[in-house]
Amino acid sequence: MKGYAMLKIGESGWIEKEVPKCGPMDAICKPLAVAICTSDVHTLWEGAVGERHNLILGHECCAEITEVGSLVKDFKVGDRVLVPAITPDWNSLAAQAGYSMHSGGMLGGWKFSNFKDGVFSEFFHVNDADGNLALLPANIDVVNACMLSDMVPTGFHGVELADVQFGDSVLVVGIGPVGLMSVAAASMRGASRILAVGTRPNCIAAAKKYGADEFISYKNGTIEDQVLALTNGQGVDKIILAGGGNETFESAVKCLKPGGKIGNVNYLGSGDYVQIPRAEWGVGMGHKMINGGLMPGGRLRMEKLGSLVSSGRLDVSPLTTHVFDGWDHLEEALFLMRDKPADLIKPVVKLAD
Ligand SMILES: [Zn+2]
């Protein structure tokens, strides 16, 4: 089979590989559509997870099952499925402890394009098929279905980590596709006011549609100064970090109310430390909680998030700005994500209807 791989840091291309073997609890799938993620760019060009040789990239797709193992109960060949970016081992102790995403070690649930071949391939392997796949609802098209692999579950997890409650004032830092889903989720969770940090006009338009009320630009000064000015010096109840860098935690702590919570789903790709400002953290006693977590994967989660799209309560269509047809355009789509033209939110490559 053909797969589009990271040959080494900074180099990519199509390679030939054996079709993966299907274990008794596994499934082999072929993608119906794949989406490119900023993580693919970090992995390939920045070496964010370290050196990898001939590792097939990609972790966002929807797919059709081509083979199932003998112990798989709930899926069969020909089923169309949602595929989460994170595919935990559900028999692990980490999963029993409630942290399935860390099965096999910290962040170990992230397998595709990290330590196993990803989905930019004619066929790919899914461990624990009954635990990880979900049927693709018939009224979700294959392009929108790709947003359920990572953008929806990650953006929504930021809101879970920040524990947004009815009436909360919320700040979302970063309104790329993940941040946009955090805005949507904060709105669904009953936020009374949503401030968002971002400058790209199409992202601002989408964020407004998802419920953002006011926008902050890093070009106009620090985030904390602007948030404090907009909130009479009080700050916000909850903050979701879906962008920024190591230094953004400092801003977040400074404009968070005592008792507030920060939910980070931003991938911190470089540097050694995150700085927490001592005084604004209440000299260590401000009850300002900082959470950061990899999205949970798994079937139940995919079914629930899929039902939000299927029912029409969540419209993910504004996330995809560029759709390509066929594997021949995969590289073009990947390079587009690297170059990030102003009108890009998410590129998707369609392989079937
Ligand atoms: Zn992704």
Image: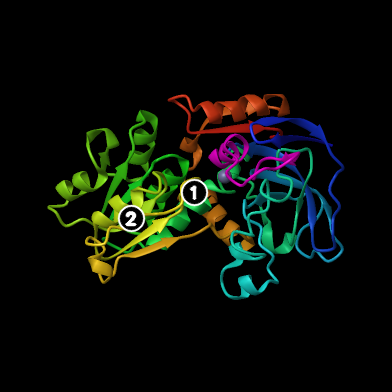
Q: Quadrant of the C terminus?
A: top right
Is residue 140 something that shows in the picture?
no
> On screen, 284 above or below 4?
below
What span is colored magenta in the figure? 37-59
Indicate yes or no whether the magenta region holds residue 50: yes
Give percent across and percent down for residue 36.
59, 36
At mark 1, the secondary structure is loop
Q: Secondary structure at mark 2?
A: strand
Which circle, 2 or 1, is nearer the viewer? 1
Question: Looking at this view, is 107 or 77 the one in front?
Answer: 107
Q: Is residue 186 toward the left or the right of residue 46 in the image?
A: left
Q: Residue at x 68, y 59 (%)?
A: 132
Position of residue 241 measured from the top left corner of the image (x, y, whole percent):
39, 51
Mark 2: C-beta under 8 Å from nearest atom of ligand 1: no
Q: Of marks 2 and 1, which one's residue comes earlier in the chain?
A: 2
**In percent of the image, x 43 and y 56: which residue is there?**
158
Specify the amino acid type for callout 2.
Answer: Ile
Q: Per the image, is 10 magenta?
A: no
Q: Read off the residue under disc 2.
A: 239
Residue 173, visible in the rendered structure? yes
Residue 197 position within the rendered picture, expressed as x and y whole percent measured from the top left: 32, 42
Above/below status of 160 relative to 221? below
Left or right: where 148 falls relative to 286? right
Residue in the image at 66% along x and 51% along y: 83
Please tell me the numbered disc located at residue 267.
1
What type is the residue that disc 1 sits on? Tyr
Locate residue 131, reporting x and y percent. Answer: 69, 64
